[in-house]
Image: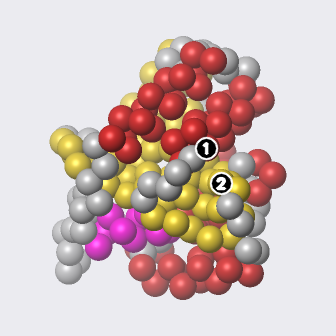
């Protein structure tokens, strides 16, 4: 549990300093162009890395649209990293309909040209701190095998693998990995 606390509110100031020094800002919620921007980030990245095509990008944009259409700022969080007015990263917490899997961490990606500058870490830290501030509970995410940097970040925060499924859901055959994190009740 000590690892999970490492990504708590105490690290937010550090993350903000990293971003401020690089001219990157993190914005909360919807902004014009966000839906298409997140879809474009995901589409370009997975096309380049794994050859995913239009079917994947359409699926990703539909998922982002559904999230934004039902956005509840009390239970959901959308964070977007911008270099000036250019979207360079995103992450979302979908908490409004959390069931047995808890809240879902989604749409987490930093443009490869901006990776290695602390943007992904800052987005992740802020998203996790936001969820904890609301009482937390279980959080889950799906990722794919072959993303070692992301997986290390999740595991360092306390996420553990609970399921593996090989499928072509993202238009390319991959080993999909479900990870969960059980956050302690407030005060522990």
Residue 148 at x, y = what percent? 66, 45
For image coordinates 51% across by 42% down, the residue present is 35
70 lies left or right of 80? left
Residue at the (45%, 44%) spot, across then down: 106
Q: Is residue 141 left or right of residue 171?
A: left
On the image, the x and y values in percent for residue 47 come to 72, 26
Q: Nearer the viewer, residue 93 or 100?
A: 93
SS of the residue under disc 1: helix
Judged left or right of residue 92, residue 153 is right
- Mark 2–mark 1 Cα distance, whole angstroms, equals 7 Å
Question: Can you name the residue that lies furthest to the front here?
Answer: 32
Query: Which quarter of the figure is the N terminus placed in?
Result: bottom left
Mark 2 / mark 1, whichever is N-terminal: 1
Task: Return the residue nearer the eye: 109 or 60.
Answer: 60
| Magenta run includes residue 132 | yes
Q: Which mark is residue 72?
A: none
Q: Which stretch is magenta? A: 125-133
Q: Which mark is residue 87?
A: 2
Name the outermost residue toward the right. Answer: 113
Pointers 2 and 1 in contact (C-beta within 8 Å): yes
**Could you tell me what secondary structure mostly forms the magenta stretch?**
helix
Residue 109 counted in the magenta span: no
Q: Quadrant of the C terminus?
A: bottom left
Coordinates of residue 88 in the picture (x, y in percent) = 68, 54
Q: Write down the residue under mark 1.
A: 37
Q: Residue at x 47, y 69 (%)?
A: 126
- Residue 49, can we see it? yes
SS under mark 2:
strand
């Amino acid at each position: 549990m000590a690892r999970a606390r490492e990504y708590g509110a105490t690290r937010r100031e550090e993350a903000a300093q990293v971003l401020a020094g690089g001219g990157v800002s993190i914005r909360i919620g919807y902004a014009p162009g966000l839906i298409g921007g997140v879809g474009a980030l995901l589409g370009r990245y997975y096309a380049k890395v794994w050859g995913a095509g239009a079917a994947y990008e359409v699926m990703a944009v539909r998922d982002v649209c559904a999230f934004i259409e039902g956005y509840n700022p009390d239970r959901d969080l959308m964070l977007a990293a911008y270099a000036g007015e250019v979207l360079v990263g995103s992450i979302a917490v979908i908490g409004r309909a959390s069931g047995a899997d808890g809240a879902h961490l989604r749409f987490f990606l930093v443009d490869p040209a901006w990776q290695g500058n602390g943007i992904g870490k800052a987005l992740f830290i802020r998203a996790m701190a936001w969820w904890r501030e609301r009482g937390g509970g279980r959080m889950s995410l799906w990722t794919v095998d072959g993303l070692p940097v992301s997986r290390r970040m999740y595991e360092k925060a306390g996420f553990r693998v609970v399921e593996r499924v090989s499928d072509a859901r993202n238009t390319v055959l991959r080993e999909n990995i479900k990870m969960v994190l059980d956050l302690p009740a407030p005060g522990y």
